[in-house]
Amino acid sequence: MMKTLFVSNVQIRRTLGLGLMAGIVFLVSAGAAMANPSFWKFEWPRTNFKKTSVEYSEIMSGGPPKDGIPSIDNPKFTDVSKVKGLGSTVPVISFTLNGESKAYPLGILMRHEIVNDRVGGVPVAVTYCPLCNAAIVFDARLDGKVLDFGTTGKLRNSDLVMYDRQTESWWQQFLGEGIVGSMTGKRLKMLPSRIEAWGRYKKAHPKGKVLLAAFPSMGFGGNPYGGYDSSAQPFLYRGPLPNGIPPLMRVVAVGDEAWSIALLRKQKRIEVKDLVLTWEAGQNSALDTRDISKGKDVGNVIVQRKTKNGLVDAVHDVTFAFTFHAFKPKGKLHHTR
């Protein structure tokens, strides 16, 4: 008989070092976390489970149901000059397109994971997976359609599995790739963005806009995953771990190559062909202390490419080593010992 365990947030915090929000109770069982397309059909009647590019055994429940982590679909913003209560070293996703600039505080994204928005006239999906520290902005246009996204409540390699509301296909956030349903094999276009300290964003974009919490009482949010990026093991991950580097060390991933933050912090600047990576102190980890403004300094990373018109921002992701290894097992990871 299948044994079911009721695990409280207190127990999870003690065993995994996660400061999860009070009152959350996960139902974990030997079968609940495993793949079950026959069961999923009741919740996902429009999804074509006959079409997939991955093994269903790789997909597991993260706890919440479909849209249990609610995306922000009608985002509200305020002017940079009107923001109060956001520490200068607190991280935000900085995104600029066609002359319009917006900042999305990670403390808000932590509880929503997806913001369906429009920037510079372009529909975009601004996404953040806390368990992978993966912040990626996608062009929401594909094959003549505009897609908007929600959360499935599922994880693969501990990474967010999104779905589009037009076809209810499932998408791997780290790759921007359809993995289940009619959109299987399709790829979303990633757009250059940064995770940077609020003070840096404010100085660079004085006329920018800043995302407000869906519930005003929450302010700019906090970290419900206290101590996570100091954990020895990733949460809800069954895959192999990278050799010679802590699995939750941050790495800067560009395509099939990545550089550890330890290496970049040491060298401050790395140039590879037309690629330029730089690191400067002054940004809190969003996944350390519950009060993000008191988190350890993980620094600000800028990734750019050399062009005839100067340096331009390049698509990249500051994620965890285990995430890069899971999705890019043949990729090259540079690290210092």
Image: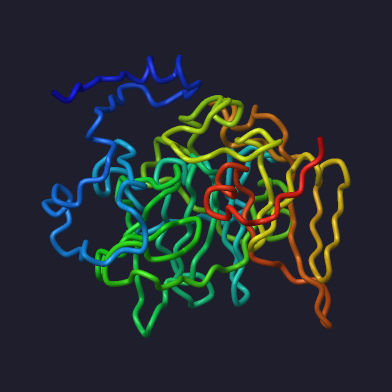
Q: In the visual, does 77 lie left or right of 63?
A: right
Q: Nearer the viewer, residue 176 or 39?
A: 39
Count every numbered label the image shows and give the total.
0
Q: Which quadrant would residue 249 be assigned to in this image?
A: top right
Give me the residue at 62% from left, 40% from top: 242
Q: Is 315 located above or below residue 15 in the figure? A: below
Residue nearest the viewer, comparing 96 with 158? 158
**What colouring method underlies this structural image?**
rainbow
In the rendered structure, the answer to whether residue 25 lies left or right of residue 333 reads: left
Q: Is residue 47 above or below residue 107?
A: below
318 to 216, vertically: above or below = below
Position of 308 with respect to 160 (left or right) is right
Residue at point 28%, 27% (across, down): 26
Establish if 335 lies above or below 75.
Answer: above
The percent coordinates of residue 175 (x first, y second) are 50, 61
Of residues 2 and 7, the one nearer the viewer is 2
The image position of residue 139, as x and y in percent, is 48, 72
Residue visible at 79% across and 66% down in the picture: 275
Q: Quadrant of the N terminus?
A: top left
Q: What's the residue at 55%, 46% (across, down)? A: 323
Q: Position of residue 277 (x, y in %)?
A: 79, 57
Q: Quadrant of the C terminus?
A: top right
